[in-house]
Image (tube, grey):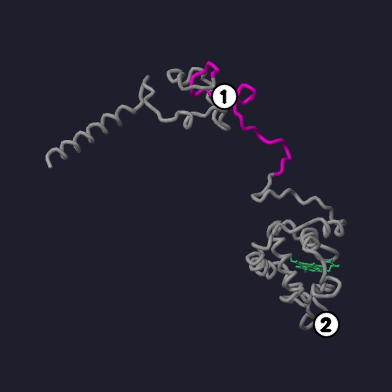
Amino acid sequence: MKIYRNINYAIVVALGVALTGCGAGGENQGLEYAPNMYHSVPYEPLSQITDEEAGEAAQILNNTGDGHGEYYNSNPLNKNGMTMRTPPANTVARNKNGYLPYRIPKDSLELAARVMVSPIDSTMAEAAIKDGKILYNRYCEHCHGDKGAGDGLVASPRAGDPDGLPVFAGVANLKSDALKGVSEGHIFHVITWGKGLMGAHGSQVSPEDRWKIAKYVKTLQK
Ligand code: HEC
């Protein structure tokens, strides 16, 4: 058994030597496995090391061949030395799903109904309808009613009103023959811009949520 113990000691000592040999410090760049993985060849987007000699001792690792030290990474083409630049004024960020701002004008409902296609495919439909119900109850039910019949609290005759008038008159019955066949794109457009007496909801309901609501409205219309 003694021989095995000696082998174990030998392994520990060899490992110790091997590991301390890797340490870097001062002028010693140490040993690195695959240095390309740590040292960026392209310019870093944000860092801005303007000292052309920075990391000169590690020139050997600098595979850009630009004659600068290893850590010099200012972008000489940009005024501020960084690769990342401030976007031009009025740049609109895409959201996480890559939606661009909705550009079909309010008065082009017919066009929207034809060309706007829901991004929710059949595999996502069930979950979307579940979310859509919650969103519909939050944003639409008080006018259109929980089943879409246009009989929400705000649209129903007001208690105590001598003429039996609702708070909000003329709310559409989403289950009517006229509306039964409308496309999800049509509903998306109406939520976004509003229509007639109905106000726009584009600023408070995200595009994802509008599509979910549209899908849910279609289930109410069945
Ligand atoms: C403040 C009350 C109110 C709210 C809230 C409301 N609507 Fe409406 N909605 C109306 C009225 C009123 C109309 C009828 C508009 C018209 O034709 O003059 C209408 C019409 C519609 C139509 C029919 C459009 C057409 O082509 O004739 C759809 C679809 C619709 N609403 C969906 C929704 C959805 C979905 C929501 C929730 C995001 C919602 N509405 C929220 C009042 C409301």
**Relative image position of residue 116 (x, y in whole percent):** 79, 56
- Quarter of the image for the N terminus: give it: top left
Depth check, front residue: 140 or 185? 185
**Residue at x 57%, y 28% (from the top left corner):** 43
**Relative image position of residue 9 (x, y in whole percent):** 18, 36
Q: Residue furthest top?
A: 67
Closer to the camera: disc 1 or disc 2? 1
Q: Is mark 1 within 8 Å of ligand 1?
A: no
Of label 1 and label 2, which has the lower sequence position? 1
User: What is the chief secondary structure element of the magenta stretch?
Assistant: loop
**Relative image position of residue 163 (x, y in whole percent):** 85, 82
Q: Which residues are magenta?
A: 65-92
- In the displayed structure, 26 sits above or below 128; it is above
Residue bearing the label numbered 2:
164
Q: Which mark is residue 74?
A: 1
Quadrant for ligand 1 reads bottom right
